[in-house]
Amino acid sequence: MSKSEFHRIRRLPPYVFAEVNAMKAKARAAGRDIIDLGMGNPDQPTPQHIVDKLVETVRDGRTHRYSTSRGIPGLRRALAGYYARRFDVRLDPEAEVCVTLGSKEGLANLAQAITAPGDTILTPNPSYPIHPYGFIIAGAAIRHVELAPGRDLIRDLARSAEHSVPAPTAMILNFPSNPTALQVDRDFYREAVALAKSRGMFILSDIAYAEIYFDTPPPSILEVEGAFDCAVEFSSLSKTYSMPGWRIGFAAGNRELVAALTRIKSYLDYGAFTPIQVAATAALNGPQDCVEAARTLYRERRDILIDGLAKAGWAVPRPTATMFAWAPLPEPCREMGSLAFAKLLLEEADVAVSPGIGFGEYGDGHVRLALVENKHRLRQAVRNIRAFLAKRGVQAAKLAEPVA
Ligand SMILES: Cc1ncc(COP(=O)(O)O)c(C=O)c1O
Protein backbone atom coordinates (compact mmCIF):
# COMPACT_ATOMS: atom_id res chain seq x y z
CA MET A 1 0.00 0.00 0.00
CA SER A 2 1.42 3.40 -0.89
CA LYS A 3 1.28 6.36 1.44
CA SER A 4 -1.28 8.09 -0.76
CA GLU A 5 -3.71 5.29 0.02
CA PHE A 6 -3.70 5.71 3.81
CA HIS A 7 -7.33 6.12 4.74
CA ARG A 8 -7.07 9.45 6.58
CA ILE A 9 -4.38 10.94 4.36
CA ARG A 10 -6.55 10.33 1.30
CA ARG A 11 -9.20 12.53 2.86
CA LEU A 12 -6.84 15.54 2.93
CA PRO A 13 -6.59 17.49 -0.32
CA PRO A 14 -3.27 19.12 -1.29
CA TYR A 15 -2.66 22.12 0.97
CA VAL A 16 -3.55 25.13 -1.20
CA PHE A 17 -1.32 27.48 0.76
CA ALA A 18 1.66 25.22 0.08
CA GLU A 19 1.71 26.35 -3.58
CA VAL A 20 1.97 30.01 -2.66
CA ASN A 21 4.45 29.20 0.13
CA ALA A 22 6.70 27.35 -2.32
CA MET A 23 6.64 30.32 -4.71
CA LYS A 24 7.37 32.67 -1.81
CA ALA A 25 10.38 30.61 -0.74
CA LYS A 26 11.69 30.52 -4.31
CA ALA A 27 11.31 34.28 -4.73
CA ARG A 28 13.12 34.91 -1.44
CA ALA A 29 15.90 32.50 -2.39
CA ALA A 30 16.30 34.56 -5.57
CA GLY A 31 16.87 37.62 -3.36
CA ARG A 32 13.48 39.30 -3.77
CA ASP A 33 12.01 41.13 -0.76
CA ILE A 34 8.58 39.56 -0.35
CA ILE A 35 6.12 41.38 1.92
CA ASP A 36 4.31 38.53 3.61
CA LEU A 37 0.65 39.11 4.39
CA GLY A 38 -0.07 35.40 4.02
CA MET A 39 -0.07 33.54 7.29
CA GLY A 40 -1.87 34.84 10.42
CA ASN A 41 1.31 34.51 12.45
CA PRO A 42 1.59 37.41 14.96
CA ASP A 43 4.92 39.18 14.40
CA GLN A 44 5.24 40.87 17.80
CA PRO A 45 7.22 39.25 20.62
CA THR A 46 5.35 37.97 23.68
CA PRO A 47 5.12 40.69 26.41
CA GLN A 48 8.19 40.76 28.66
CA HIS A 49 6.47 39.92 31.95
CA ILE A 50 5.15 36.68 30.47
CA VAL A 51 8.58 35.71 29.12
CA ASP A 52 10.13 36.57 32.51
CA LYS A 53 7.68 34.27 34.28
CA LEU A 54 8.62 31.44 31.93
CA VAL A 55 12.33 31.96 32.58
CA GLU A 56 11.85 32.19 36.33
CA THR A 57 9.78 29.00 36.39
CA VAL A 58 12.03 26.97 34.14
CA ARG A 59 14.93 27.50 36.58
CA ASP A 60 13.07 25.33 39.08
CA GLY A 61 13.88 21.73 38.22
CA ARG A 62 10.65 20.49 39.75
CA THR A 63 8.80 21.99 36.78
CA HIS A 64 10.64 19.73 34.34
CA ARG A 65 8.56 16.65 35.03
CA TYR A 66 5.47 15.55 33.13
CA SER A 67 2.76 18.15 33.54
CA THR A 68 -1.03 17.64 33.73
CA SER A 69 -2.84 16.85 30.51
CA ARG A 70 -5.95 18.87 31.33
CA GLY A 71 -3.89 21.78 32.61
CA ILE A 72 -2.53 22.87 36.00
CA PRO A 73 -5.30 24.04 38.39
CA GLY A 74 -3.98 27.61 38.58
CA LEU A 75 -4.26 28.03 34.81
CA ARG A 76 -7.76 26.59 34.72
CA ARG A 77 -8.72 29.01 37.50
CA ALA A 78 -7.11 31.88 35.57
CA LEU A 79 -9.29 31.09 32.54
CA ALA A 80 -12.36 31.06 34.81
CA GLY A 81 -11.23 34.48 36.10
CA TYR A 82 -10.95 35.80 32.54
CA TYR A 83 -14.46 34.56 31.62
CA ALA A 84 -15.89 36.14 34.78
CA ARG A 85 -14.22 39.53 34.13
CA ARG A 86 -14.71 39.69 30.42
CA PHE A 87 -18.04 37.93 29.82
CA ASP A 88 -19.63 37.71 33.27
CA VAL A 89 -19.67 33.93 32.77
CA ARG A 90 -19.03 31.55 35.70
CA LEU A 91 -16.94 28.49 34.88
CA ASP A 92 -16.17 25.59 37.20
CA PRO A 93 -12.42 25.14 36.64
CA GLU A 94 -12.70 21.48 37.66
CA ALA A 95 -15.41 20.35 35.27
CA GLU A 96 -15.89 23.07 32.68
CA VAL A 97 -12.31 23.94 31.60
CA CYS A 98 -9.61 21.97 29.80
CA VAL A 99 -6.25 23.47 28.79
CA THR A 100 -5.16 22.51 25.26
CA LEU A 101 -1.90 22.60 23.29
CA GLY A 102 -3.25 25.55 21.33
CA SER A 103 -6.91 25.70 20.38
CA LYS A 104 -6.14 23.86 17.13
CA GLU A 105 -5.15 20.73 19.05
CA GLY A 106 -8.28 20.98 21.18
CA LEU A 107 -10.57 21.32 18.18
CA ALA A 108 -8.97 18.35 16.42
CA ASN A 109 -9.00 16.09 19.45
CA LEU A 110 -12.55 16.96 20.46
CA ALA A 111 -13.59 16.08 16.90
CA GLN A 112 -11.86 12.69 17.35
CA ALA A 113 -13.50 12.19 20.72
CA ILE A 114 -17.11 12.79 19.67
CA THR A 115 -17.29 11.59 16.07
CA ALA A 116 -18.55 8.28 14.73
CA PRO A 117 -17.75 7.47 11.08
CA GLY A 118 -20.30 9.06 8.78
CA ASP A 119 -21.58 11.64 11.26
CA THR A 120 -22.61 14.91 9.66
CA ILE A 121 -21.12 18.21 10.83
CA LEU A 122 -22.20 21.71 9.77
CA THR A 123 -19.35 24.11 9.05
CA PRO A 124 -19.57 27.67 7.78
CA ASN A 125 -17.48 28.13 4.65
CA PRO A 126 -15.02 29.80 4.13
CA SER A 127 -13.45 28.75 7.41
CA TYR A 128 -10.20 28.14 9.26
CA PRO A 129 -9.13 24.74 7.86
CA ILE A 130 -9.07 22.74 11.11
CA HIS A 131 -12.80 23.38 11.57
CA PRO A 132 -13.83 21.07 8.73
CA TYR A 133 -10.63 18.99 8.58
CA GLY A 134 -10.55 18.11 12.26
CA PHE A 135 -13.85 16.35 11.66
CA ILE A 136 -12.91 15.00 8.22
CA ILE A 137 -9.84 13.35 9.77
CA ALA A 138 -12.15 11.94 12.43
CA GLY A 139 -14.30 10.33 9.72
CA ALA A 140 -17.23 12.76 9.55
CA ALA A 141 -19.00 14.11 6.50
CA ILE A 142 -19.07 17.90 6.29
CA ARG A 143 -21.97 19.99 5.13
CA HIS A 144 -20.54 23.38 4.13
CA VAL A 145 -22.80 26.36 4.73
CA GLU A 146 -21.92 29.59 2.94
CA LEU A 147 -20.76 32.42 5.18
CA ALA A 148 -20.89 35.87 3.60
CA PRO A 149 -21.97 39.37 4.59
CA GLY A 150 -25.69 39.83 4.06
CA ARG A 151 -26.49 36.11 4.26
CA ASP A 152 -28.58 34.78 7.13
CA LEU A 153 -26.24 32.13 8.54
CA ILE A 154 -28.73 30.86 11.12
CA ARG A 155 -31.39 30.33 8.46
CA ASP A 156 -28.87 28.54 6.22
CA LEU A 157 -27.64 26.37 9.10
CA ALA A 158 -31.24 25.51 10.01
CA ARG A 159 -32.00 24.54 6.42
CA SER A 160 -28.85 22.40 6.23
CA ALA A 161 -29.71 20.72 9.52
CA GLU A 162 -33.19 19.96 8.23
CA HIS A 163 -31.91 18.38 5.02
CA SER A 164 -28.92 16.46 6.42
CA VAL A 165 -29.09 12.68 6.73
CA PRO A 166 -28.02 11.58 9.24
CA ALA A 167 -29.03 14.59 11.32
CA PRO A 168 -25.93 16.65 12.14
CA THR A 169 -24.27 16.01 15.47
CA ALA A 170 -22.49 19.34 15.74
CA MET A 171 -21.95 22.72 14.15
CA ILE A 172 -18.95 24.96 14.26
CA LEU A 173 -18.98 28.69 14.81
CA ASN A 174 -16.03 31.07 14.68
CA PHE A 175 -16.64 34.74 15.37
CA PRO A 176 -14.81 37.04 14.91
CA SER A 177 -14.22 34.92 11.85
CA ASN A 178 -11.07 33.81 10.19
CA PRO A 179 -10.89 34.51 7.26
CA THR A 180 -13.88 36.84 6.76
CA ALA A 181 -13.41 39.01 9.91
CA LEU A 182 -17.21 38.97 10.38
CA GLN A 183 -18.54 39.45 13.92
CA VAL A 184 -21.82 38.39 15.54
CA ASP A 185 -23.81 39.63 18.53
CA ARG A 186 -25.50 37.87 21.45
CA ASP A 187 -28.76 37.54 19.53
CA PHE A 188 -26.96 35.46 16.95
CA TYR A 189 -25.70 33.15 19.69
CA ARG A 190 -29.19 32.97 21.21
CA GLU A 191 -30.54 31.77 17.87
CA ALA A 192 -27.64 29.37 17.41
CA VAL A 193 -28.21 27.79 20.81
CA ALA A 194 -31.96 27.53 20.14
CA LEU A 195 -31.25 25.84 16.80
CA ALA A 196 -28.71 23.45 18.30
CA LYS A 197 -31.06 22.45 21.09
CA SER A 198 -34.02 21.98 18.78
CA ARG A 199 -31.95 19.67 16.56
CA GLY A 200 -29.97 17.89 19.28
CA MET A 201 -26.66 19.31 18.03
CA PHE A 202 -23.55 20.35 19.87
CA ILE A 203 -21.86 23.68 19.10
CA LEU A 204 -18.10 24.14 18.93
CA SER A 205 -17.39 27.87 19.10
CA ASP A 206 -13.92 29.24 18.36
CA ILE A 207 -13.14 32.71 19.74
CA ALA A 208 -9.41 32.86 18.97
CA TYR A 209 -9.89 36.56 18.00
CA ALA A 210 -12.12 37.57 20.92
CA GLU A 211 -9.59 40.21 22.08
CA ILE A 212 -8.51 41.49 18.66
CA TYR A 213 -11.36 43.92 18.08
CA PHE A 214 -11.47 47.60 17.11
CA ASP A 215 -14.99 48.52 18.04
CA THR A 216 -17.45 46.30 19.87
CA PRO A 217 -15.94 43.58 22.11
CA PRO A 218 -17.08 40.22 20.73
CA PRO A 219 -19.36 38.21 23.06
CA SER A 220 -18.91 34.59 24.16
CA ILE A 221 -21.57 32.05 23.29
CA LEU A 222 -21.46 30.99 26.96
CA GLU A 223 -23.13 34.29 27.90
CA VAL A 224 -26.35 33.01 26.38
CA GLU A 225 -28.90 31.10 28.43
CA GLY A 226 -28.79 27.39 27.74
CA ALA A 227 -25.39 27.49 26.07
CA PHE A 228 -23.83 25.22 28.68
CA ASP A 229 -26.33 22.52 27.63
CA CYS A 230 -24.81 22.23 24.17
CA ALA A 231 -21.77 24.44 23.57
CA VAL A 232 -18.06 24.33 24.17
CA GLU A 233 -15.90 27.33 23.39
CA PHE A 234 -12.26 27.34 22.32
CA SER A 235 -10.09 30.30 23.22
CA SER A 236 -6.39 30.89 22.74
CA LEU A 237 -3.49 32.93 24.02
CA SER A 238 -1.84 32.90 20.57
CA LYS A 239 -3.26 36.18 19.27
CA THR A 240 -4.27 37.90 22.51
CA TYR A 241 -0.76 37.84 23.99
CA SER A 242 1.27 37.18 20.83
CA MET A 243 2.04 33.65 22.00
CA PRO A 244 1.44 31.55 18.85
CA GLY A 245 4.52 29.38 19.33
CA TRP A 246 3.80 28.58 22.97
CA ARG A 247 0.80 26.38 22.14
CA ILE A 248 -1.69 27.23 24.85
CA GLY A 249 -5.45 27.32 24.36
CA PHE A 250 -8.59 26.28 26.19
CA ALA A 251 -11.89 24.49 25.85
CA ALA A 252 -14.61 25.69 28.22
CA GLY A 253 -18.34 25.15 28.68
CA ASN A 254 -20.47 22.02 28.35
CA ARG A 255 -19.31 19.42 30.87
CA GLU A 256 -19.90 16.42 28.64
CA LEU A 257 -17.75 17.86 25.86
CA VAL A 258 -15.05 19.07 28.23
CA ALA A 259 -14.97 15.61 29.83
CA ALA A 260 -14.71 13.92 26.42
CA LEU A 261 -11.78 16.14 25.43
CA THR A 262 -10.10 15.72 28.81
CA ARG A 263 -10.40 11.96 28.57
CA ILE A 264 -9.05 11.61 25.05
CA LYS A 265 -6.18 13.98 25.86
CA SER A 266 -5.29 11.96 28.94
CA TYR A 267 -4.41 9.14 26.51
CA LEU A 268 -2.53 11.39 24.10
CA ASP A 269 -0.42 13.95 25.97
CA TYR A 270 0.95 15.02 29.35
CA GLY A 271 -0.03 18.65 28.96
CA ALA A 272 2.02 21.65 27.99
CA PHE A 273 5.42 22.10 29.68
CA THR A 274 4.67 23.38 33.20
CA PRO A 275 6.69 26.64 32.87
CA ILE A 276 4.60 27.50 29.81
CA GLN A 277 1.41 26.91 31.78
CA VAL A 278 2.68 29.03 34.67
CA ALA A 279 3.61 31.85 32.27
CA ALA A 280 0.18 31.51 30.60
CA THR A 281 -1.39 31.94 34.05
CA ALA A 282 0.64 35.13 34.47
CA ALA A 283 -0.64 36.32 31.08
CA LEU A 284 -4.29 35.93 32.10
CA ASN A 285 -3.90 37.20 35.67
CA GLY A 286 -1.38 39.96 34.98
CA PRO A 287 -1.55 43.48 33.53
CA GLN A 288 -3.68 43.70 30.39
CA ASP A 289 -2.26 46.87 28.81
CA CYS A 290 -0.30 44.65 26.39
CA VAL A 291 -3.62 43.48 24.93
CA GLU A 292 -4.76 47.07 24.37
CA ALA A 293 -1.38 47.79 22.75
CA ALA A 294 -1.89 44.84 20.36
CA ARG A 295 -5.33 46.17 19.40
CA THR A 296 -3.87 49.62 18.72
CA LEU A 297 -1.11 48.16 16.59
CA TYR A 298 -3.47 46.08 14.46
CA ARG A 299 -5.91 48.99 14.15
CA GLU A 300 -3.19 51.30 12.84
CA ARG A 301 -1.99 48.68 10.39
CA ARG A 302 -5.56 48.00 9.28
CA ASP A 303 -6.13 51.66 8.48
CA ILE A 304 -2.88 52.01 6.53
CA LEU A 305 -3.77 48.97 4.44
CA ILE A 306 -7.47 49.66 3.87
CA ASP A 307 -7.03 53.40 3.20
CA GLY A 308 -4.03 52.76 0.97
CA LEU A 309 -5.80 50.10 -1.08
CA ALA A 310 -8.87 52.32 -1.43
CA LYS A 311 -6.69 55.10 -2.86
CA ALA A 312 -5.17 52.55 -5.23
CA GLY A 313 -8.69 51.77 -6.49
CA TRP A 314 -9.26 48.53 -4.56
CA ALA A 315 -12.23 48.76 -2.17
CA VAL A 316 -11.70 46.31 0.69
CA PRO A 317 -14.11 46.19 3.67
CA ARG A 318 -12.56 47.61 6.85
CA PRO A 319 -12.45 44.72 9.37
CA THR A 320 -13.91 45.46 12.82
CA ALA A 321 -11.97 42.59 14.42
CA THR A 322 -9.23 40.00 13.77
CA MET A 323 -5.87 40.64 12.17
CA PHE A 324 -7.19 40.03 8.66
CA ALA A 325 -8.69 41.92 5.76
CA TRP A 326 -10.93 39.80 3.52
CA ALA A 327 -10.58 41.35 0.11
CA PRO A 328 -12.79 40.65 -2.91
CA LEU A 329 -10.63 40.12 -6.00
CA PRO A 330 -10.23 43.49 -7.74
CA GLU A 331 -12.34 44.00 -10.86
CA PRO A 332 -9.82 43.13 -13.62
CA CYS A 333 -8.82 39.92 -11.81
CA ARG A 334 -12.25 38.74 -10.73
CA GLU A 335 -12.49 35.86 -13.18
CA MET A 336 -9.11 34.28 -12.56
CA GLY A 337 -9.86 32.86 -9.10
CA SER A 338 -8.04 33.47 -5.86
CA LEU A 339 -5.09 31.10 -6.34
CA ALA A 340 -4.10 32.53 -9.73
CA PHE A 341 -4.52 36.05 -8.35
CA ALA A 342 -2.37 35.33 -5.28
CA LYS A 343 0.36 33.90 -7.53
CA LEU A 344 0.23 36.90 -9.84
CA LEU A 345 0.41 39.34 -6.94
CA LEU A 346 3.45 37.52 -5.59
CA GLU A 347 5.15 37.46 -8.99
CA GLU A 348 4.47 41.06 -9.95
CA ALA A 349 4.02 42.97 -6.68
CA ASP A 350 6.22 40.95 -4.29
CA VAL A 351 3.26 40.70 -1.90
CA ALA A 352 2.15 37.33 -0.51
CA VAL A 353 -1.52 36.86 0.43
CA SER A 354 -3.64 33.78 1.21
CA PRO A 355 -5.93 32.66 -1.63
CA GLY A 356 -9.51 32.45 -0.41
CA ILE A 357 -9.96 29.00 -1.96
CA GLY A 358 -7.67 27.68 0.79
CA PHE A 359 -10.50 28.40 3.25
CA GLY A 360 -13.10 26.53 1.19
CA GLU A 361 -14.99 26.74 -2.07
CA TYR A 362 -17.01 29.81 -1.06
CA GLY A 363 -13.77 31.68 -0.43
CA ASP A 364 -12.60 31.68 -4.02
CA GLY A 365 -13.72 35.23 -4.82
CA HIS A 366 -11.44 36.67 -2.13
CA VAL A 367 -7.91 36.77 -0.78
CA ARG A 368 -6.98 37.22 2.87
CA LEU A 369 -4.41 39.82 3.87
CA ALA A 370 -2.89 39.41 7.35
CA LEU A 371 -1.75 42.49 9.26
CA VAL A 372 1.54 40.89 10.29
CA GLU A 373 4.06 43.26 8.69
CA ASN A 374 5.05 46.64 10.13
CA LYS A 375 3.58 49.94 8.93
CA HIS A 376 6.53 50.79 6.74
CA ARG A 377 6.28 47.47 4.89
CA LEU A 378 2.49 47.73 4.65
CA ARG A 379 2.91 51.11 2.92
CA GLN A 380 5.39 49.47 0.55
CA ALA A 381 2.89 46.67 -0.10
CA VAL A 382 0.23 49.26 -0.93
CA ARG A 383 2.60 51.03 -3.39
CA ASN A 384 3.43 47.73 -5.08
CA ILE A 385 -0.24 46.77 -5.33
CA ARG A 386 -1.12 50.21 -6.72
CA ALA A 387 1.41 49.73 -9.52
CA PHE A 388 0.09 46.20 -10.12
CA LEU A 389 -3.49 47.48 -10.43
CA ALA A 390 -2.52 50.49 -12.55
CA LYS A 391 -0.98 48.11 -15.10
CA ARG A 392 -4.42 46.51 -15.34
CA GLY A 393 -6.21 49.76 -15.88
CA VAL A 394 -7.41 50.40 -12.31
CA GLN A 395 -7.38 54.15 -11.80
CA ALA A 396 -5.74 55.23 -8.57
CA ALA A 397 -7.28 58.70 -8.98
CA LYS A 398 -10.80 57.30 -9.29
CA LEU A 399 -11.22 57.04 -5.56
CA ALA A 400 -13.07 53.94 -4.47
CA GLU A 401 -14.79 54.40 -1.11
CA PRO A 402 -13.68 51.83 1.43
CA VAL A 403 -16.69 49.85 2.57
CA ALA A 404 -17.41 50.53 6.24
C1 LIG B 1 -9.94 30.86 13.99
C2 LIG B 1 -8.70 30.27 14.55
N1 LIG B 1 -8.79 29.33 15.48
C3 LIG B 1 -7.70 28.77 16.03
C4 LIG B 1 -6.44 29.14 15.61
C5 LIG B 1 -5.26 28.43 16.19
O1 LIG B 1 -4.96 28.95 17.41
P1 LIG B 1 -3.95 28.21 18.37
O2 LIG B 1 -2.62 28.84 18.15
O3 LIG B 1 -4.52 28.44 19.72
O4 LIG B 1 -3.94 26.75 17.99
C6 LIG B 1 -6.28 30.11 14.64
C7 LIG B 1 -4.94 30.49 14.19
O5 LIG B 1 -4.73 31.11 13.20
C8 LIG B 1 -7.44 30.68 14.09
O6 LIG B 1 -7.36 31.60 13.12
Image (cartoon, rainbow, N blue to C red):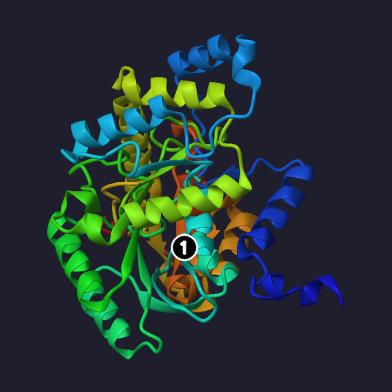
Image spot of residue 375 (x, y percent): 44, 33
371 sits to left or right of 289: right
Residue assigned mark 1: 131
Residue type marked 1: His
Element under disc 1: helix
Residue visible at 38% across and 37% down? Answer: 301
Q: Nearer the viewer, residue 49 or 119?
A: 119
Q: Look at 30% across and 22% down and name the residue there.
A: 288
Q: Specify whether residue 136 is in view.
A: yes
User: Which residue appears at 54% of the width and 9% of the height?
Assistant: 56
How crowded is the residue under tag 1: few (<14 C-alpha within 10 Å), some, or many (20+)?
Answer: many
Residue 128, x across and y down, in percent:
47, 59
Q: Kindly indicate the quadrant of the structure image that contains residue 161.
A: bottom left
Q: Residue at x 17, y 69 (%)?
A: 194
Q: The C terminus appears in which quarter of the rendering? A: bottom left
**Closer to us: 8 or 198:** 198
Q: Position of residue 229 (x, y in %)?
A: 24, 60
Res. 392 visible in picture: no
Give the image location of residue 350, x and y in percent.
61, 49
On screen, residue 63 above or below 255: above
From the image, which quarter does the N terminus lie in?
bottom right
